Amino acid sequence: MPPPALDAALRYAALGYRVLPLWPGAKRPHGRLVPHGLKEASADPRVLAAWWRADPRAGVGILAPEGVLVLDLDAPEAWSRLRAAFPELGGAPRQRTPRGGVHLFLALPPSAPEGLSVAAGALPGVDLRGLGRAYVVAAPTRLESGAYRWEVPLAAPALLPPAPQGLLEALRPPPPVPPPPLPLTPVSPRRLWGLLQRFAARVAATPVGRRHLTLIRYARAAGGLVPYGLDPLEAEAVLVAAAMAAGLPEKEARAAARWGLGVGQRAPLPLAPPPRRPARPRRRRVKAAPRR
């Protein structure tokens, strides 16, 4: 008899979702089975069977496709507020988290605003998942605080109810704030490039489980260099390449890097002036004695 987690993973895959194994009792991808994280999420029954044969205690993560929006509501009151504002959400597939939160699965209509990102939510207590970029932990995964369970069963992506237009407007990211004018104190391009390379090295060396937040942290720091003259497009390219080297998928890395760079531009980093090299003492010329 297959483990309950494998049985659930096969059902999710049959509905049209990719899944990945999680460390037993944790939310992070199973580094031994999927060392590259989300890149290895699969719907192949043979791959799933091999994963849970290797570790029957592994939990289950669902990676919803691009056209599926998953709302991660971290507390019961957040779900109560959202359901009061949009009663039609009551019949959408949803699961309860061990701490009383909710994962709500919705279809993303063609009229959805551009720029929806899993980097941050625009509503208090609501994070965005799915969109082919961020997974959610799924039943029957069990943590120390309890188990995940479905209140309304999951449906295939084509059968999910569409996200209400009013909700999508509320989730629209705010317009970017223009960066402040360049400071009076100039910073050399060589120094800016060196700092960016240092940030990228930290991102590339981040272990599984902390990559997304680490990328955002150093993207914000790199954004703080833009007012000094750092090219934001160049910074994005360097940080995304570093995040992909650490194992993040390109779309997730690009969304997080852009968000962090945009936020960081509003708060320039306080850069200390470079240390001044001591002046070299002048060598005194000794006049040659006149010839006699």
Image (spheres, rainbow, N blue to C red):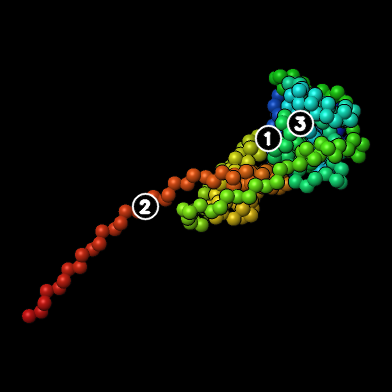
Q: Position of residue 188 (x, y in %)?
A: 48, 56
Q: Are marks 3 and 2 in contact (CB under 8 Å)?
A: no
Which residue is the site of mark 3?
Answer: 72
Residue 28: x, y in percent?
69, 32
CA gap, disc 2 and disc 1 = 47 Å
Q: Is residue 6 visible?
A: no
Q: Which is nearer the eye, 17 or 2?
A: 17
- Residue beneath label 2, please? 276
User: Which sits earlier in the primary sequence, circle 3 or circle 1?
Assistant: 1
Question: In the rendered structure, which disc, 3 or 2, sits on the residue that comes first in sequence?
Answer: 3
Q: Position of residue 183 (x, y in %)?
A: 51, 52
- Residue 274 seen: yes
Q: Say which element carries label 2.
A: loop
Residue occupying the far right of the picture: 159
Percent across and percent down for residue 180 are: 57, 50
Q: Which mark is residue 31?
A: 1
